[in-house]
Amino acid sequence: MLPPSSEGGRPVVLGNVVLGVAYGPADVVDILRQAGIEEAVIALDDRQLIEWQGGGPDVWK
């Protein structure tokens, strides 16, 4: 996850592909699910799955 933009959204990137922009934790889960990742394995605090930049899952602005 890239740092929040000035509008508050965070680009969700998988590899080198931007999958979408999340405006909250539920958006992250939805974007990853749409990319084919099973919701059961998505844990926003799992540093092995998600690399947060500019703050963790609680930082959106």
Image (cartoon, grey):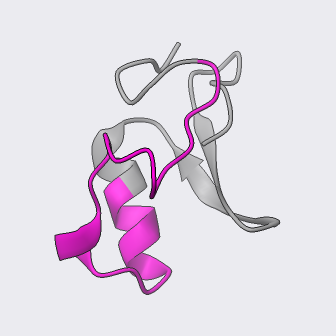
Which residue is found at the position 32% from the left and 41% from the top? 25
19 part of magenta stretch: no
| 32 vs 37: above or below | above
Q: Main secondary structure of the magenta part?
A: loop
Q: Which residue lies furthest to the front in this view?
A: 48
- Image location of residue 33, percent across then percent down: 36, 75
Q: Is 27 left, or right, of 11 in this rendering?
A: left
- Image location of residue 48, percent across then percent down: 45, 54
| 16 vs 48: above or below | below
Which residue is found at the position 44% from the left and 25% from the top? 56
The quarter of the picture where the N terminus appears is top right
Q: Please tell me which residue lies in front, 42 or 17.
A: 42
- Image location of residue 9, percent across then percent down: 58, 32
| 23 vs 3: above or below | below
Q: Is 7 left, or right, of 32 in this rendering?
A: right
| 50 vs 30: above or below | above
Q: How many marks on residues?
A: 0
Q: Residue furthest left?
A: 40
- Image location of residue 24, percent across then percent down: 37, 36
Which residue is found at the position 44% from the left and 44% from the top? 47
- Magenta span: 29-54
Which residue is found at the position 29% from the left and 63% from the top? 42
Q: Which residue lies furthest to the bottom in this view?
A: 36
47 part of magenta stretch: yes
